[in-house]
Image (spheres, grey):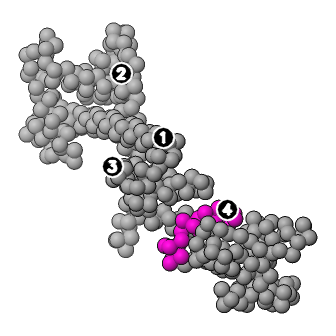
Amino acid sequence: MVQLQNQFLQNSPSAGDGTMVADELLEPDVQIITSGGRIIPAHSRILASASPVVERLITSPQKRRSSDRKIHILGVPYDAVSAFVQFLYSSKCDEEHMEKYGIHLLALSHVYFVPQLKQNCTRGLAERLTIENVVDILQLARLCDAPDLYVKCLKLLSNNFNTVEETEGWKFLQNHDPWLELEILRFMDEAESRKKRTRRYREEQSLYLQLSEAMDCLEHICTEGCTSVGPYDMDPSKNKGPCSKFSTCHGLQLSIKHFVTCKRRVNGGCLRCKRMWQLFRLHSSICDQTDECRVPLCRQFKLKVQEDRIRDDATWRLLVRKVVSVKTVCSLSLAKRKREDEPRVATNYY
C-alpha cells in the first residue's frame, strides 16, 4: 500500500506545479478500520477526491472539533477493502481482485459512490455469472441499483431455471425473499409471452412473404412464361427455363393447370381451385396496371369491386396491406443490395 501511495504522489499532476504541497501527503493522516481490527493507513485528500461519501466521513469529525480521523469499513474482508482503497488511489482494478472480491467491490462502490468502480464491477460480474452464483448476484444487483447486471441475471436464471431451482441460493431466496421470487416468476412469464408473440409475428411475416413471392411468380408466368406454363399467345415450346424462384413458380404452375382443367371448380367444391381463385383476387387488389396486366381475372375482379358486387372485409384489407408492405420492403432491400454490390464489382474489375 505504501508503494502504491508513493506511486500516486509521483504521478499526481499537482505534485509538480506547487498547487498541492507533497509534504502534506507523504504521511497518512487517516486510518481505515476493517473487520478484525486491521488498519489501512491512507491520505484523506486522495480518498476525498475519489469518493464524496468518504469526503463527508472525513470532514464530519472536524465539524465536531474532534481529532478522530478513522473510517470504519466493516462486514467486508480485509483484502477486499485493500483492493477498494487501491482503486481509489490508482483508478485500476486487477482481474485477480475482481475474480475474488467482485461482489464486495460492487457493494463498496455503491455505498461510497464510486461510479467507475461500480461500472467495472457490473461488467466483470456479468462476465462471471454462473448457475451457482446467479441468485446471489441478482440480489446484490437489486440492492446496489445495477439494472444491466440485474437483467442479465434474470435472463440467465430464466433460461436455466430448472437447474437454478436446485441450488442453495434459490432455496434461500424462497425462504427469505418471496417478493423477489415473485418478480423472477413474473419476468419468466413475460419472457415466454414475448417469445410466443415473436414466434407468431415471424410466422405471419413468413406467410406474407410467401404470398408476395407468389404474386411475383404469377405475374412472371402470365407475362413471360416459365417452363410449361405461359401466356395464351406464346408457344409453349418457346417458354423459358426455370426461374430463380422455381420452387414457388413450379407449384403455382401446377395449380394453374389444375384450375383450368378442374370440373368441380364450377360448383365451388374444389379447395385447390378456391385457393387459386383467392390468389387471382389478391393479385387484382394489388395490381396497379389493369389495362396492361395479363394475369387472368384481374380486370374482372376490379370491375366487380367497382360495381360493389364484392365487399372487402377488414381481414381481407389487412391481408392486402401486409402483402403490399412486405413486397415494398423486399424491393427496397433488393435495390439496396444491388447498389452495394456495384462498387464491389468495380473494385474487383480494377
Q: Quadrant of the N terminus?
A: bottom right
- Give the number of the mark in front: 4 or 2: 4
Q: From mark 4 to mark 3, how far is it between C-alphas?
A: 34 Å
State the mark number for residue 116. Answer: none
Task: Using the image, determine if residue 87 lies above or below residue 163.
Answer: below
Q: From mark 4 to mark 2, how far is it between C-alphas?
A: 60 Å
Number of numbered discs on residues? 4
Task: Using the image, determine if residue 156 lies above or below residue 90.
Answer: above
Whole-percent x and y of residue 294?
25, 28
Looking at the image, which residue sits at the far front? 36
| Residue underneath mark 1 | 182
State the mark number for residue 316. Answer: 2
Image side of residue 228 versus residue 333, left or right? left
Q: Secondary structure at mark 2?
A: helix
- Which of the two discs, 2 and 3, labels the residue nearer the N terminus? 3
Residue bounds of the magenta highlight: 95-114
- Label 4 is placed on what type of residue? Val
- Which of the two discs, 4 and 2, labels the residue nearer the N terminus? 4
Residue 9, by quadrant, is bottom right
Residue 243 in view in this figure = yes
Residue at (77%, 74%) from the top-left corner?
A: 70
| Residue underneath mark 3 | 162
Q: Secondary structure at mark 1?
A: helix
- Label 2 is placed on what type of residue? Trp
- Give the number of the mark in front: 1 or 2: 1
| Label 2 neighbour load within 10 Å: few <14, some 14-19, many 20+ | few
Residue at (38%, 16%) from the top-left corner?
A: 313
State the mark number for residue 111. Answer: 4
Q: Secondary structure at mark 3?
A: helix
- Label 1 is placed on what type of residue? Leu
- Label 3 is placed on what type of residue? Asn
Q: From mark 4 to mark 1, how far is it between C-alphas?
A: 27 Å
